[in-house]
Each structure stands twice: as C-alpha cells, then as structure tokens.
Amino acid sequence: MSFRKQPSQVCCALLLIFTSLLILPASVLGQRSKDKFWQQRMEMVETAVKGAGITNPKVIQAIQKTPRHEFMPKKMWDQAYLDAGIPIGEGQTISSPFIVAYMTESLEPDREDRVLEIGTGSGYQAAVLSPLVDKVYSIEIVEPLGKQAAKSLKKLRYDNVFTKIGDGFKGWDRYAPYDKIILTCSPEEIPKPLKDQLKEGGLMVVPMGERHQQTLYLMKKVNGELERQPLRPTLFVPMTGAAEENRRVFPDPSQPGILNGDFEEGVDKSGFVNGWYYQRQCEVKEEVLAPSGQHFVKFSNKVPGQFSWLMQGLAVDGRRVAKIKLSASIACEGVAEGPHRGDLPLIAIQFLAADRSDLATEYIGPFQGTRTWKNYDREISVPVGAREAILRIGLFGATGTASFDNVIIRTVESK
C-alpha cells in the first residue's frame, strides 16, 4: 500500500467521489435539455436527492428546475452538481443539494406559507423554496453575498423572494409572524427574536450546536415555546453577528482530534453515528475482536456509484500545528472500483482556509479487493493557511463492504 501526495488528478478523483452517476430513467432522458447543465442536474437528483431518501415530489421537482450553477461563481460551475458544499466567497458555502432538499422537505412547505430565511448566502435555498411557498423573506449579514444573491434571484425572476442585508439574529420583524423559518447557518442557541417572529404552530428548521458538532432540528412553536425534534447530525458555517458574539463553546485549533473514532459511543436515537454526519449506507457493528473496543463502522454498497460515507469536521490552525498523524484500522471484502477512477474506500482529510477554500487533500488508501483488519497511519503536514479540516471515510462510489475502526488524528509537531 502506498501513500500518494495530492496531484491534480487526485483532486479530480476526490471531486468525482461526490457525484458518482447512475443511469437516468427514460422519462428524464426524453426531456429536451433546458440548459447545458440539465442532464448533470437530473443525474444529481437521481443519486444525491432521490437516491438519498428525499420523497416529496414537489421538492424533487424544485431541485430539478433550480439552476444551482447560477448561484455560484462561474469559475466553480464545473462543481455545481456535486453533492457537496462549495465555497462561494466571504468564508461562506452553498449547501449540498441533498441538505437543501432535506431541509426543504422537513419544513413541509405549503403554497400559502410566508417563510423567513436566515442566511441568504448564494440565494440557492431561497430559489428552491420560491415555487413551493407564497413568499420568501431572506436576510444576509455579509453585504457582498447579499447583493450578489439579490442580483441572481432578480435575473432568474424569483419574484416572490425578498432580500435584505442585516443581522439574522434580529429576524425581519416587518413581515412577521412567519409560517416557517429556516436557518442556513448554525447558532449555538435559537435567537429570541426568531422564536418571537414564528407563528404559533409554525415550523423552524435549524442546524444548532457547537462549531463542528451540530444537529439539524425541526422545531414547532407550541404555546409560545419551541418543541425540538432532532433530525440528523450536520455541519454548517456558524451564524455570525450577535449569535457568534454570544457563543460560549469554541474548539481548540491547536489540538485537532476526532470524536467517537473508535465508534464505542454507537448511534443516537435516530440511528446516526454519534459525532459524525452525512451518513450514507453504513452501520455500527459489534464484534469482540474489533481492533479497538467492541464496535466499528461498516459501509456496504451494491450499486456502483451510490454514495457510502461518513464525515466529520474539526478545527486545526496551520499557524500552530505543523504536522498531524492520521491513523485507522481498515478491512475490506469484495471491494470493486466504482464508475469513476478514485471510487474506492479511503480516508481523506481536506484542509480548508479561513474563507473555506480548498488548500489540500491528503489520504490513506485507496483500498480494493478483500483484506483483513490492518492498521494504517501517516504523518501529514498541515498547510499554514489551514483553519479547519473535513475528514471523510467510506466506500464512496465503490461496491462491496469496507470497515473502519480506531480513526485517530493527533498532533505530532506544533509551532
């Protein structure tokens, strides 16, 4: 097994990991292309939206019709239909298509709804909501993003979307109360003005929690209070402004590490692996002879190109950490490469700058065929500009099974 550096072709392979394609239904192929990205969008919907469990036909149709590339810098258009969050500048990202679809479906949109969105960002989430509700009122705290989003929405004639520049912590009292509220950024706790501006009986979808450990909640206002239903682990950019000023818990970027890397904490009440997010086709297994403790995570996939992975975000400051060691125990059975080169099990760590632009991706693997449990480790230099990282494990687009245990990141050289 060799460990390779990050050449340009590896960047392409890792991007393809997020958009392995399936054959489209005849009904879709028979449609006349409405733009040059139409087919890519349909393929993305099949794999990343419908293939991941979204069932509301109106939400699926909205995702199909919304030109995601139009809400991104033109230089990023080649990544527009990857199922991944993509940087859009100013330290912000456009959420992955699956997350946008999932949050929209969870909000239970109705044609009579007035919806408040906190965090316009690129304008993509507001555009998806537009044909499903009466009006969307959207607030963005970052002025350049807010202006660009308003321009994009106007150009594409989303006439029932209204935007403004401001701190979403305060909401938009002028048009309250709202039937629904959606947050595309993560506060540590719900700002009181948003609670007050939600109509009695109304719903709110919000990612909430610590910087890299968040849960997506569906909340309903009952007798003036918000009843919480956890949906799934997730990772969003933090809510800035007053919400960030009131934040109490901050990660230590000088001591990067992984939570529940031995999987002994098991799963939450909804069946999601504790500490990890974006779970696809995996489960926690129990075995006395597991490499660490008695539990490990097993990924299984029978459809070439279908997603199968876990992810976890962590803080790491390249000005303070020079080198880390990444290690894990891995076993595979009957693993075959997916439809694109690079669709194989691996461990990848992607380093991001303060503006969330990609700095480098390093990895252990890839693996294929059948192999018994074995421990792998690698020392990795941290780019000086790194401020956070995303760790990914899984089969990605490969078929077969792959098991991971004892996933560890520790600092081996500080500055």
Image (cartoon, rainbow, N blue to C red):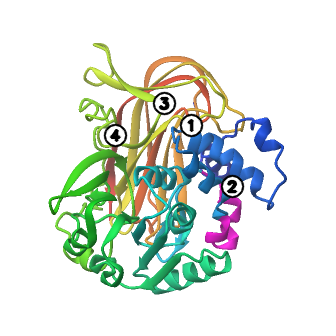
The reply, left or right, for residue 398 in relation to residue 205 is: right
Mark 3: amino acid = Gln
Answer yes or no: is residue 130 visible: yes
Mark 1: amino acid = Phe
Marks 1 and 4: in contact by CB < 8 Å? no
- At a point 26% along the width and 20% down the height, the residue shown is 294
CA–CA distance in space, label 1 to label 2: 23 Å
Disc on the earlier residue, 1 or 2: 2
> How many circles with numbers are drawn on the protein?
4
Closest to the observer: 23 or 20?
Answer: 23
Q: Position of residue 43 (x, y in %)?
A: 70, 45
Residue 80 in magenta? yes
What residue is disc 2 on? 8
CA–CA distance in space, label 4 to label 1: 23 Å
What's the mark number on residue 408? 4
Disc on the earlier residue, 3 or 2: 2
User: Mark 1 or 2, which is nearer the eye?
Assistant: 1
Marks 3 and 1: in contact by CB < 8 Å? yes
Q: Position of residue 128 (x, y in %)?
A: 56, 62
User: Mark 3 or 2, which is nearer the eye?
Assistant: 3
User: Mark 4 or 1, which is nearer the eye?
Assistant: 1
- At a point 69% along the width and 72% down the height, the residue shown is 74
Question: Dot 1, crowdedness within 10 Å: few (<14), some or many (≥20)?
Answer: many
Secondary structure of the residue carrying tag 3 is loop
The reply, left or right, for residue 239 in relation to residue 96 is: left
What residue is disc 3 on? 281
What residue is disc 1 on? 307
Query: Is 206 placed above or below 234 here?
Result: below
CA–CA distance in space, label 4 to label 3: 22 Å
Marks 2 and 1: in contact by CB < 8 Å? no
For the record, the magenta segment spans 69-82
- At a point 27% along the width and 80% down the height, the residue shown is 170
